[in-house]
Amino acid sequence: MELKPTRYEGRREERGFAVEDHNSTVNQDIKRKFVSREVYGCFTQEVEYILSRWDYNDAPFSYDDVEHLYMPYCTDCGEGYINFSQEEDEDGFPIYVCDDCGRRYSEDDYRDLDTQEAEIYEWWAVSGFLAKKLAARGECVIDGPCAWYWGRCTTGQAILLDYVISCICEEMGILDGQPNSWAKLPA
């Protein structure tokens, strides 16, 4: 099976992830099941209203509660907002690797990078499981008093087509041809 090149080609294959087509018909069905189980509904209006009341004492959360609202961006590739993978060097110290160009940053250098605010288009209520997976991938999330909210920085397409959802499903091994594939599960 020949793999299509991806920007993550080397590191992803080393970790054992090598799904050929995240958006095949079978994988779209799997991701649709995953999204219907883990995403509860769109709460953009409610979350935006609460965030607009940040200066009142009755607001259950504020912008200070949004994880990953400000994200560092790589100084080498200049692509703006990007994701970083956390790895360890040979001495066990954390390093951060730009997923776009592969530049490696020490923990101190990573903290010194310039940041920019994420552009959130929609807020979705999600399960705690998905919120933690999203946060681990640098997505904006709020741990609200009654629900977890995901600040989606994409709009105009089905959530199942978001790259972060494909990565989470691939990491879980539930896509077609993976060990825990949901391909044979009933709809």
Image: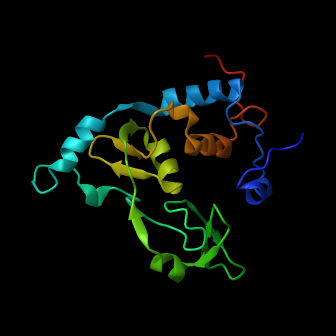
Q: Is residue 82 above or below residue 166?
A: below
Which residue is rendered at x = 70% and y = 40% of the image?
A: 173
Q: Nearer the viewer, residue 37 or 116?
A: 116
Which residue is rendered at x = 30% and y = 37% of the image?
A: 44
Q: Is residue 82 left or right of residue 115?
A: right
The extreme front residue here reads 78
Q: Is residue 70 above or below residue 42?
A: below
The extreme top residue here reads 187
In the picture, the quarter occupied by the C terminus is top right
Q: Is residue 52 left or right of residue 133?
A: left
Which quadrant of the figure has residue 22? top right
Q: Nearer the viewer, residue 54 or 144?
A: 54
The extreme right residue here reads 1
Q: Is residue 35 left or right of residue 52?
A: right
In the image, residue 113 lies at what x, y percent? 47, 76
Which quadrant of the figure has residue 90? bottom right
Q: Is residue 7 above or below residue 37?
A: below
* Number of numbered callouts drawn: 0
Which quadrant of the figure has residue 97? bottom right
In the picture, the quarter occupied by the N terminus is top right
In the image, residue 75 lies at what x, y percent? 55, 74
Q: Is residue 59 above or below residue 73?
A: above
Which residue is rendered at x = 55% and y = 59% of the image?
A: 83
Which residue is rendered at x = 78% and y = 51% of the image?
A: 16
Q: Nearer the viewer, residue 69 or 148?
A: 69
**How is the model colour-coded?**
rainbow
In the image, residue 53 lies at what x, y percent? 14, 50
